Amino acid sequence: MTIEYKSVTYDLTTTNLTTTLTVNATTRVIIKEISVANEHNNTVECDFFLNKSNGSAIFYHTKIPADSNDNAVHNTLVMEENDYLTFQVATAAVISGQISFALISRKNQNG
């Protein structure tokens, strides 16, 4: 088992659901932070979904004030094999951020 600390950025250029992080079949992810920045001069509504094999659920819903930032994860968020995150915003091209996480690989694990 190996653990890698990683981060990825995202830019929500559409109001459609956007996949931001996908976990493959041999790893798990522990998310420490999902930073969300609003570069717009108005409040923007945002929804954050955790998608699993048996369905999806909103884990964070917020209205981010103009020219401010937020964190969508206040403790940790555990993602299992084949889970993925999707985000959706009410206004396109004004929300961006980064996801900080530990990637736990079980590839070549014995047992």
Image: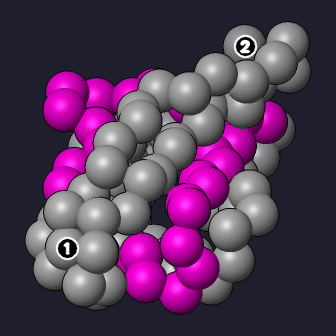
- Circle 2 SS class: loop
Q: Is residue 105 left or right of residue 83?
A: left
Residue 108 visible in rendering: no
The one nearer the camera, 95 or 45, is 45
Determine the image quadrant of residue 12. bottom right
- Above or below, 64 relative to 83: below
Which residue corresponds to the image point at 31% horizontal and 49% vertical from the top-left? 63
Q: Residue furthest toward the front? A: 42
Tell me the residue at 85%/12% (across/down): 54
* Between marks 2 and 1 in the image, the one whose residue lies nearer the viewer: 1
The residue positioned 72% from the left and 31% from the top of the image is 51
Query: In the visual, does 82 lie left or right of 86?
Result: right
* Place of residue 111 in the rendered image (x, y in percent of width and height, measured from the top left): 72, 13
The 10 Å Cα crowd at callout 2, few under 14, some 14 to 19, many 20 or more, is: few
Q: Which residue is mark 2?
A: 111
Residue 11 appearing in the image: yes
Indicate the secondary structure of the residue bearing disc 1: loop
Q: Quadrant of residue 84?
A: top right
Residue 85 shown left or right of residue 31 in the figure? right
Q: Nearer the viewer, residue 1 or 44?
A: 44
Whether 48 is among the magenta residues is no
User: In the displayed structure, does residue 73 sit left or right of residue 28?
Assistant: left
Q: Amino acid at mark 1?
A: Ala
Q: Residue at (38%, 63%) from the top-left corner? A: 44
Q: Marks 2/1: CA distance? A: 50 Å
N-term-proximal mark, 2 vs 1: 1
The three-letter code of the residue at mark 2 reads: Gly
- Region of the chain picked out in magenta, as a range: 70-96
Q: Position of residue 19 (x, y in %)?
A: 71, 59
- Furthest toward the left, the residue is 68
Q: Which residue is mark 1?
A: 66
